[in-house]
Amino acid sequence: MFQYDFMQYAFIAGTLVAIMCGAIGVFVVARSLSFVAHTFSHIGFAGAAFAVYVGIEPLGGLLLFTIASALGIGQMGVKMFRRDASISVILSLFLGLGILFLSLSNKQANFTASILFGSVVGINIQDVWQIVGLTIVVILVLAVGYRWLKFDSFDQVGAESAGLPIRWISVGFLLLMSISVSVAVQIVGALLVFALMTVPAAAARCFTQSIFGMILVSSILAVLGVWFGLVMSYYTNAPVSFFITSFEALAYFIGIVYQRLVNRYRVAQLN
């Protein structure tokens, strides 16, 4: 399997994206921003289609559209955006724009499938270097702002009382999310990117209460899911994203069962 260059590239890129999504996903879940990740994926699809239409790299279009939308949501306010019923209109609009750009370009079927469902085995060395660079940026920024982001995500009232720049933290995190979604779309596709960004983090909360522990467990589950998906896809020729999402869903359900067993054990000990 590793004798092929495309599988080597797929494992390198998939591992980096999984670590990034696993780490940032903990804060996505804590801040209840799963719907934003879903929105970014739809907007990213339109961005990638626009990039193909104008003749630039799809990743460039993804970043352009998602970063612009992150700044827009940041100016509007996440709470207002979440309450606004027009979110469904925004999702439909950008899906429609994506389809329009594809219809105007000469790349349709294959490109649509790769963007919607992912094409990690189609990644080349140039894509790997792009993913390496963007992943390093996201991880470094996340590490630098870890204390403020942790405080604001898990104790917003306390963060406001402490005088932290809540608005700037929110906008900065949305920008990190937009970059992460743009990169992850290449692995699991626009339709399933939120699964890699939220499910491992949701499962991690069942196994530990430590924030750093959640990040560690979430990243491990995301990496294992990507590895499992690549191996199974290689031997079965089925879509990678199917195996990734199946693995993460199984991990989540196991986490729920584990959490219930632990709670029952603690209640039994008290009695």
Image (tube, rainbow, N blue to C red):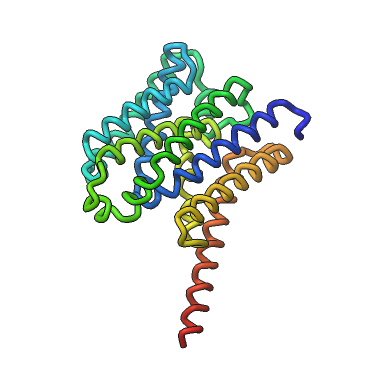
Compared across the picture, whether 227 is left or right of 181 comes to: right
Most distant residue in the top direction = 55
Q: Position of residue 99 (x, y in %)?
A: 40, 24
Q: Against 130, is 22 above or below?
A: below
**Quarter of the image where one finds residue 98:** top left
> Which residue appears at 43% of the width and 17% of the height?
51
> Which residue appears at 52% of the width and 57% of the height?
252
Q: Position of residue 233 (x, y in %)?
A: 67, 39
> Which residue appears at 47% of the width and 23% of the height?
59
Q: Is residue 246 visible?
A: no
Give the number of callouts: 0
> Which residue appears at 60% of the width and 32% of the height?
13
Q: Position of residue 246 (x, y in %)?
A: 58, 50
Compared across the picture, whether 4 is left or right of 249 comes to: right
Compared across the picture, whether 37 is left or right of 201 comes to: left
User: Between residues 37 and 134, which one lies in front from this camera angle?
Assistant: 134
Most distant residue in the right direction = 3
